[in-house]
Image (cartoon, helix red, strand yellow):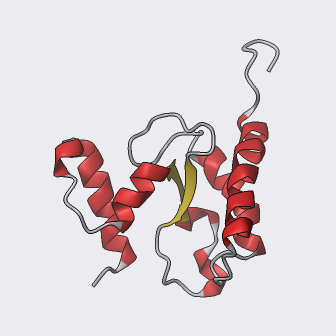
Amino acid sequence: MNRTGKKPLKVRADELLSLNWSKIIKAGHKEKLYNFEYFMNRAYAFNRDKGRCRVCKEVLQGDNIRIHHIKPKLPLEEVNRVPNLASMHEHCHQMIHSRKDYSSVGHVKWGKILGFREKLSFI
């Protein structure tokens, strides 16, 4: 922090993700996916992803961050583990959960979106 003037990722993760925590509580999510383990592991996933979106690789900032369950149909004891969580922008997250064709957003990004979609088991 002294050399660059930037806060360490862990501190930023806690600050940024606490905003999302408030939104989830306000929305009244009562799904089993959003348990204590999920909320504890979000910052670890964010740090592992180095504060960047797993879809577009851009830096995550503000309240635009979502932590995505890569395989949401895993058993409860596995679904909220860090390897199954991915940090991303809200709009990238929406593209994954949508069935729309976003191939115009760019080949690499579209490939990532399709990769995440396959793991959701849409069908």
Q: Position of residue 17 (x, y in %)?
A: 70, 50
- Give the camera-side residue of 34 and 3: 34
Q: Position of residue 77 (x, y in %)?
A: 66, 83
Please state if 26 lies on the left or on the right of 76 as rendered: right
Up the image or down, 44 lies above or below 122; here it is above
| Image label count | 0
Q: Position of residue 102 (x, y in %)?
A: 22, 53
- Residue under the point 29% across and 46% down: 109
- Residue under the point 52% across and 40% down: 52
Q: Quadrant of residue 50?
A: top right
- Residue placed farthest to the front in the image? 26
- Residue under the point 79% across and 38% down: 11
Q: Quadrant of the C terminus?
A: bottom left
- Give the camera-side residue of 4 and 62: 62
Q: Quadrant of the N terminus?
A: top right
- Residue placed farthest to the right in the image? 2
- Residue under the point 49% across and 52% down: 90
- Residue placed farthest to the top in the image? 3
Up the image or down, 47 lies above or below 20; here it is above
Up the image or down, 67 lies above or below 106; here it is below
Q: Quadrant of residue 20?
A: bottom right
Q: Position of residue 30 (x, y in %)?
A: 68, 82
Up the image or down, 36 lies above or below 46; here it is below
